[in-house]
Image: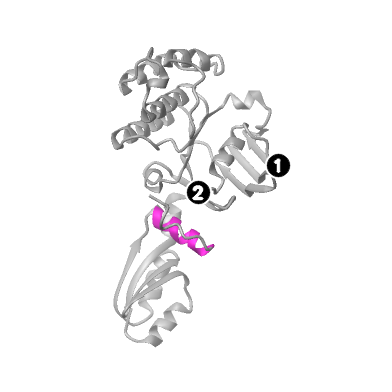
Amino acid sequence: MIKINNLIKEFDGFKAVNGITTSIEEGHVFGLVGTNGAGKSTLLRMISGVLKPTEGTVIVDGENVYDNAGIKKEIFYISDEQYFPCSTPADLERYYKSMYENFDSARFAELLEKFGLDKNRRINTFSKGMKKQLSVIIGVCANTKYLLCDETFDGLDPVMRQAVKKVFIAAMEDRNMTPIIASHNLRELEDICDHVGLLHKGGILFAKDLDEMKLGIHRLQVVFTNDEERVRFEENQEIMRDEVRGSLHTYTIRSSMDDLRNAVASVDTIFSEILTLSLEEIFISETEVVGYDVKNIIE
């Protein structure tokens, strides 16, 4: 289990991470989503022990991770900006076997073959997508308990994205691996993550079970019989957004499905329909609440 308490990281007076407190349970796929500059990469580097926090702690399985060689053996970090200190995948295998004693060479050879990667080809001739695939293969074969992934799916075509996800799932079934995936591509996280943390300007807005998130925010399209009924309905609702087109109101409301259904039933309407939001729509709604417009930058 990873416990993060009041974590702060400053660079020249700028707080890239500002007071994050959360926990990541074992055996889950945890997604970190956030606006550009939200602090996702910095947070992953502190979890992996690469960066020392300015304040606060990162505790992994009961131990402080920074400057702790023993606990770092249970963490593999795949950075967004790839750097390969060795010339071929075979060289890379030897390099990481010296760092991770449980490195699975048989699985490494198997996955290289499945992904069509030549073990003896120079890595600097690989495409961006091939390098991403190689990083994931190395990360999985290191056999660590925690796998930290920074924009892992960026540069992969749709077929390879699905293949990488299957590799994650297989590793989780084989052993107690916990992937933590940071991405700005919400669609990629939605079908693989079961827990999601939403970062904004260095802080965390929430960290929740994905299904719980989807069940807690809904979109309601409704036409009221008159304005008095609309006012009566709105009085008891936590409305995050109200878009009006003629007599049609489209609300984004923080509420359970049952409570929202009861609220709609308690007023007179001409038409009503409750819709479930996608992770992307939830992300937009939550960030707009704190004054950030993300419509033009998310995929």
Segment colored magenta: 280-290
Principal secondary structure, stretch drawn in magenta: helix
Camera-nearest residue between 39 and 275: 39
Where 51 sits versus 193, above or below? above
Q: Residue at x 63, y 43 (%)?
A: 4
Mark 2 secondary-structure assignment:
loop
Where is residue 89 drawn, in percent x and y? Answer: 42, 16
Q: Residues within 10 Å of mark 1 (few under 14, many from 20)?
A: some
Distance between the alpha carbons at the discs numbered 2 and 1 = 21 Å
Q: Residue at x 64, y 23 (%)?
A: 70
Where is residue 125 drawn, in percent x and y? Answer: 38, 21
Where 36 sits versus 163, above or below? below
Give left or right: position of 102 versus 70: left
Label at residue 54: 1
Where is residue 80 drawn, in percent x and y? Answer: 48, 35
Amino acid type indicated by mark 1? Thr
| Location of residue 133 (image quadrant) | top left
Contact? badges 2 and 1 (CB < 8 Å)? no
Which residue is disc 2 drawn over? 36
Mark 1 secondary-structure assignment:
loop
Q: Residue at x 66, y 48 (%)?
A: 14
| Location of residue 248 (image quadrant) | bottom left
* Comes first in the chain, label 2 or label 1: 2
**Can residue 285 be found in the magenta stretch?**
yes
Q: Residue at x 32, y 85 (%)?
A: 225
Where is residue 262 drawn, in percent x and y? Answer: 39, 73
| Location of residue 134 (image quadrant) | top left
Where 289 sits versus 206, above or below? below
Amino acid type indicated by mark 2? Asn
